[in-house]
């Protein structure tokens, strides 16, 4: 079933346009604006250009989704297959199925919302032209990662995003941005070198780099020892990007230093590239190797769940001087642990849960980083003790809509039933209860119990954050120092209030509502109607795990 019948050639064009248009837009952003499009000043013109290009890509992605045959989501659609480097057998092979389509839409949506937000709230730094061009290159690389079906093209797209993100952190970030950017690039590049060796091993031993052909072969053309080595090499590179404990240490520093839109794209899009590689490459192409490492992957995953939650609890406690952006970054380590646990089960239930949790994390954590960025703009800090101690009423009394939305995002992140965060975690735990044949049930049920304990820790630190930031420390207003009574607002002067009541900050602005409402709405929609995602992913996952057989 397709909502609108679109010809295959148009579908091919749409997918190629989605991948290439941001790259062309990045080049155009560096050129002088035509006389009729300059607006009030060159900076406004280039920011408007960024909104236009990302908006066009989002519209194309939506049309692609509308024309997608939802009755056959396991079939590769909108495919393009052109010989590129004949000597190496590398082809420009593009296509989407029920696994990649949701990630394509998520990337297009988040990048558009970031461009829209930046139009009104550009982070402090050098040339806006460079900023827009880097965001567009980042979008192109991410979209290509989810659309290409050739191992070497996948690697090129996977690497394409590293340099733009490095410069976004290093040039437009906050304190310690250069150290954080170097840590990010060194970790990810070192992981990628090892990953390339694994990809080359698979291609040379099997005689092809075509991901569809390799998935259909289901590892039959590769010996078990080759699969084990390939999974180890490729898995390390993917685990760094995911990030999996203990290869995660670059993530908190990068998030803390990155500008708001950099954090949104890093958490909402870039982390998904690693887990997507596990599902698209390792599960179908090297199943025996994955089966060997699945218990270890699950063990690292549940350690990451508990470790991330304990780190968040430590940052959230009173007097810890914890940075709220850093806390959300550590929460990502825990949430991505659930994704890795679902993949490690090697079952349709677990992998579907992992893919659902991927999308849910992109929506919810993207919203959280938007909100934390807005709070930092208003207060001038993301220090949790400062935010909690500034007033007895905090956000609920000073910016009620902002406080309510932060509370909504927090309860969505902790997995409240009826919101998107619930289904992914539940399905991954169900998958761990009954893992694939050949995997130890007692071990995976132990992992399931540890993961379930991690959900309780997640609820604990998220509720502490809501209590401290939205409700404050209940300090009587008369006992606050003058500095605590009047924190700075980056969005304009505080509104006067009645005597004895806490001063108010600027609440959600129109442009903020435009950027955040889609994420909140989709979080509710995916929570109430999970079949909208699972109906796409499940047939594709079943086929992937069955070795290309529907």
Image (tube, grey):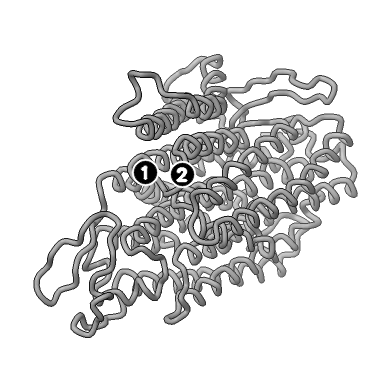
Q: What residue is shown with label 2? A: 531
Q: Position of residue 291 (x, y in %)?
A: 78, 54
| Residue drawn at 31 percent across, 58 percent down | 405
Q: Are marks 1 and 2 in contact (CB under 8 Å)?
A: no
Q: Quadrant of residue 240?
A: bottom right
| Residue drawn at 81 percent across, 19 percent down | 86
The disc, 1 or 2, on the residue closer to the chain's N-terminal end is 1
Q: Is residue 18 left or right of residue 208?
A: left
Q: Residues within 10 Å of mark 2 (few under 14, many from 20)?
A: few
334 shown above or below 117: below
Q: Quadrant of residue 73?
A: top right
In this view, the residue in front, 232 or 496, is: 496
As drawn, the residue found furthest toward the bottom would be 479
> Do we see residue 166 in this rendering?
yes
79 shown above or below 440: above
The quadrant of the picture occupied by the C terminus is top right
| Residue drawn at 25 percent across, 49 percent down | 509
Label 1's element? helix
Q: What residue is shown with label 1? A: 117
Q: Quadrant of residue 66?
A: top left
In this view, the residue in front, 33 or 280, is: 33
In this view, the residue in front, 472 or 214, is: 472
Q: Residues within 10 Å of mark 1 (few under 14, many from 20)?
A: many
Label 2's element? helix
Give the label on residue 301, or none.
Answer: none
As drawn, the residue found furthest toward the left would be 498
């Amino acid at each position: 079933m397709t909502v609108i019948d679109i010809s295959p050639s148009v579908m091919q064009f749409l997918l190629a346009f989605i991948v290439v248009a941001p790259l062309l837009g990045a080049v155009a952003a560096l050129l002088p604006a035509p006389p009729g499009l300059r607006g009030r000043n060159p900076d406004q013109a280039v920011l408007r250009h960024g909104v236009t290009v990302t908006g066009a890509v989002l519209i194309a992605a939506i049309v692609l989704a509308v024309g997608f045959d939802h009755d056959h989501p396991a079939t590769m659609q909108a495919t393009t297959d052109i010989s590129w480097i004949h000597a190496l057998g590398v082809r420009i092979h593009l296509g989407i199925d029920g696994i990649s389509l949701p990630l394509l839409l998520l990337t297009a949506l988040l990048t558009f919302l970031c461009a829209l937000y930046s139009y009104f709230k550009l982070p402090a730094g050098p040339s806006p032209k460079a900023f827009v061009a880097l965001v567009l290159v980042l979008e192109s690389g991410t979209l290509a990662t989810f659309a290409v079906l050739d191992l070497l093209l996948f690697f090129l797209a996977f690497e394409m995003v590293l340099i733009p993100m490095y410069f976004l952190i290093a040039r437009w970030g906050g304190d310690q941005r250069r150290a954080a950017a170097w840590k990010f690039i060194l970790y990810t590049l070192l992981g990628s070198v090892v990953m390339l060796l694994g990809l080359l091993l698979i291609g040379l031993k099997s005689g092809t780099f075509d991901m569809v052909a390799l998935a259909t072969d289901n590892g039959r053309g590769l010996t078990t020892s080759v699969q084990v080595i390939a999974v180890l090499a490729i898995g390390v590179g993917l685990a760094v990007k995911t990030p999996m404990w203990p290869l995660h240490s670059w993530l908190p520093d990068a998030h803390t230093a990155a500008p708001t839109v950099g954090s949104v794209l890093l958490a909402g899009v870039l982390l998904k590239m690693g887990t997507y590689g596990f599902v698209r490459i390792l599960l179908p192409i090297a199943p025996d190797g994955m089966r060997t490492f699945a218990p270890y992957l699950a063990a690292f995953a549940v350690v990451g769940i508990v470790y991330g939650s304990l780190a968040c609890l430590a940052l959230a406690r009173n007097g810890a001087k914890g940075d709220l952006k850093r806390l959300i970054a550590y929460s990502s380590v825990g949430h991505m642990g659930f994704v890795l646990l679902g993949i490690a089960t090697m079952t349709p239930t677990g992998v579907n849960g992992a893919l659902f949790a991927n999308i849910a994390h992109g929506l919810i954590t993207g919203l959280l980083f938007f909100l934390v960025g807005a709070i930092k703009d208003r207060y001038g800090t993301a220090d949790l003790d400062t935010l909690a101690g500034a007033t007895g009423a905090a956000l609920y009394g000073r910016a009620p809509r902002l406080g309510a939305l932060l509370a909504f995002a927090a309860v969505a992140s902790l997995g409240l039933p009826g919101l998107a965060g619930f289904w992914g975690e539940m399905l991954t735990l169900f998958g761990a209860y009954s893992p694939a044949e050949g995997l130890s049930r007692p071990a995976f049920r132990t992992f399931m119990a540890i993961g379930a304990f991690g959900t309780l820790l997640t609820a604990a630190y998220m509720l502490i954050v809501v209590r401290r930031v939205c409700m404050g420390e209940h300090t009587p207003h008369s006992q606050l120092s003058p500095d605590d009574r009047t924190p700075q607002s980056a969005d304009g002067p505080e509104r006067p209030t009645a005597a004895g009541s806490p001063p108010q900050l600027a609440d959600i602005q129109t442009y903020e509502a435009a950027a955040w409402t889609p994420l909140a709405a989709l979080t509710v929609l995916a929570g109430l109607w999970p079949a909208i995602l699972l109906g796409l992913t499940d047939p594709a996952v079943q086929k992937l795990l069955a070795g290309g057989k529907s």
